[in-house]
Amino acid sequence: MNGVTTGDPAGTTVPEVPTVALFVTCLVDLFRPSVGFAAIKLLEDAGCRVVVPQSQTCCGQPAYNSGDREDTKAIARQVIETFEGFDYVVAPSGSCGSTLRKHYPELFADDAEWSKRATAFSAKVFELVSFLADVRGVAAVDAALPVTVTYHDSCSGLRELGVRDQPRRLLQSVTGLTLKELPEADVCCGFGGTFCVKYPDVSNAIVGKKTKHIASTGADLLLAGDLGCLMNMDGKLKREQIGVEVRHVAEVLAGMTDTPPIGGKL
């Protein structure tokens, strides 16, 4: 098969129809499989062959954030072995994506063999919407949704992977959709994985401020690229009886909004 140089920062040569391994993530697998199916559709529409390795597990982020480096290394080795043979690895999550791309090489800095493998692996890893826009050159999607939405920038995707303009550009191509910018869109929602468990009062105060900003937009639908953030904000919106539904951005971009929103219908 003929090769082409892509938008991959590493400048590697890959097939014209690249094989992309979908890193599903734990939360998508257990709570919102529709996000995984939306990701597959978007990747296939972008000209990719998609594989979902059955042996994949957690990326190791909870252990990493808790300071457990040895268990994180064990998880990382398994992930690298499972995914390193594909052209790209794509995750519908900036949080998991940044763990794979940014932190795996750091884990093995003192291990020559695994450092090389981790570095080569991490160069193939991308967050879903960033991959579509920056690597595959997707400028528009074939979707329609006559609704007003607002968008939250998840911390890891924004700060570690530079995901900000890409989802907004693609959302502007959705027929009938109106994007209303969220005040302090780049401020944490208070989830932070285990942070919300260790510091529930602080987490609740942060997400309370976030839901007030969401309500102020008058949007019907809240979108983001990380399921953890979305579930956290949806829970607070429901408790405060704020009538805003919540979805992963991939579901809207893929035109797959027939399923109920996160947390069910209002």
Image (cartoon, rainbow, N blue to C red):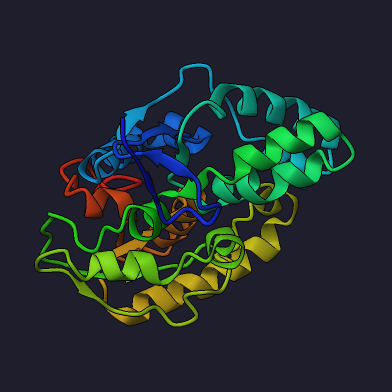
Q: Nearer the viewer, residue 14 or 187?
A: 14
Placement of the N terminus among the 4 image quadrants? top left
Q: Which residue is pictured at 30% across the width and 58% down the height?
A: 137
Q: Determine the residue located farthest toward the right in the rendered image.
A: 110
Q: Is residue 248 visible?
A: no
Residue 101 in the image, given as x and y percentages of width and height: 62, 47
Residue 154 in the image, given as x and y percentages of width and height: 51, 62
Q: Nearer the viewer, residue 1 or 187?
A: 1
* Left or right: residue 93 compared with residue 2: right
| Position above or below: 148 against 62 | below
Total of numbered circles in the picture?
A: 0
Q: Is residue 16 visible?
A: yes
* Left or right: residue 160 compared with residue 208: right
Q: Which residue is pictured at 76% across the width and 42% down the height?
A: 64
Q: Determine the residue located farthest toward the front in the rendered image.
A: 2
Give residue 220's quadrant in the image. bottom left
Residue 24 in the image, given as x and y percentages of width and height: 45, 34
Q: Nearer the viewer, residue 262 or 201?
A: 262
Placement of the C terminus among the 4 image quadrants? bottom left
Give residue 243's quadrant in the image. bottom left
| Position above or below: 33 against 223 | above
Give residue 238's quadrant in the image. bottom left
Q: Which residue is pictured at 45% across the width and 43% down the height?
A: 13
Residue 262 in the image, given as x and y percentages of width and height: 34, 47
